[in-house]
Image: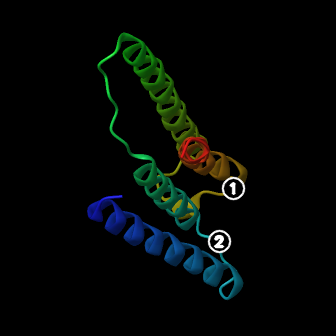
Amino acid sequence: MSNTKKIVVTIGSLFFIASIIAFFYNWLVNETIYSANILFSFILLSTVLNFLNMKEFDKNEADELDQHVKTQSARIGYYVLMILAGLILFISEGTSNLNDIENYPLLLVVGLTLIIQPITEFLYARKYK
C-alpha cells in the first residue's frame, strides 16, 4: 500500500470513528439523532473502503478487457441505483436539510447502498490474497 493511500485511509478512518462517537454522544447525552451524522458516517466508511480496494488493472488481453467492461457496467449500474435511492430519500422527505429527515429506515438503506459494494469488493479481494 502506498504512503498516500495509507494516509488517506488513516485520516478517513479517524473521521469515521469521530463521526460515530459524535453520533452516540448526541444520541445518549442529548437524546437526539442527527440524520446528517448517520449519512456522513456512511459516506466516510464508503470512502475508506473504496481507497482500500483501489488497484491497477492490466487491459492487454481481450478476455480481461471484456471482464473489465462487465465490471465497469455493473459498477455504473450500482452507482445509478445509489443516486436514485438518495433522490428518493430527499424527494420523499421534501427537505434538503439532513437533520430534518425522519424516515430512518430509508436513510439506512441509502447509507447501506454506499458501503455494500466496497465491503463486498474488499472481502472478495481478500479471498485471493
Point out residue 10 in the picture as x, y percentages from the top left corner.
40, 70
Q: Residue at x 37, y 42 (%)?
A: 55
Q: Residues within 10 Å of mark 1 (few under 14, many from 20)?
A: few
Per the image, the residue denoted by label 1 is 104
Q: In the rendering, which numbered label is found on residue 39?
A: none
Point out residue 32 in the picture as x, y percentages from the top left corner.
66, 76
Q: Amino acid at mark 1?
A: Tyr
81 left or right of 28?
A: left
Q: Decide which of tag 1 and tag 2 comes sooner along the chain.
A: 2
As rendered, which of 7 and 30 lies closer to the eye? Answer: 7
Q: Residue at x 62, y 48 (%)?
A: 112
66 left or right of 102?
A: left
Q: Residue at x 28, y 65 (%)?
A: 3
Q: In the rendering, which numbered label is found on residue 33?
A: 2
Q: Residue furthest front?
A: 129
Is residue 63 depicted above or below 84 in this figure? above
Quarter of the figure with the N terminus: bottom left
Is residue 11 depicted above or below 125 in this figure? below
Is residue 35 depicted above or below 69 in this figure? below
Point out residue 43 in the picture as x, y percentages from the top left corner.
48, 56
Is the residue under label 2 in contact with that under label 1 (CB below 8 Å)?
yes
Per the model, the C-alpha gap separating discs 1 and 2 is 10 Å
As rendered, which of 94 and 47 lies closer to the eye? Answer: 47
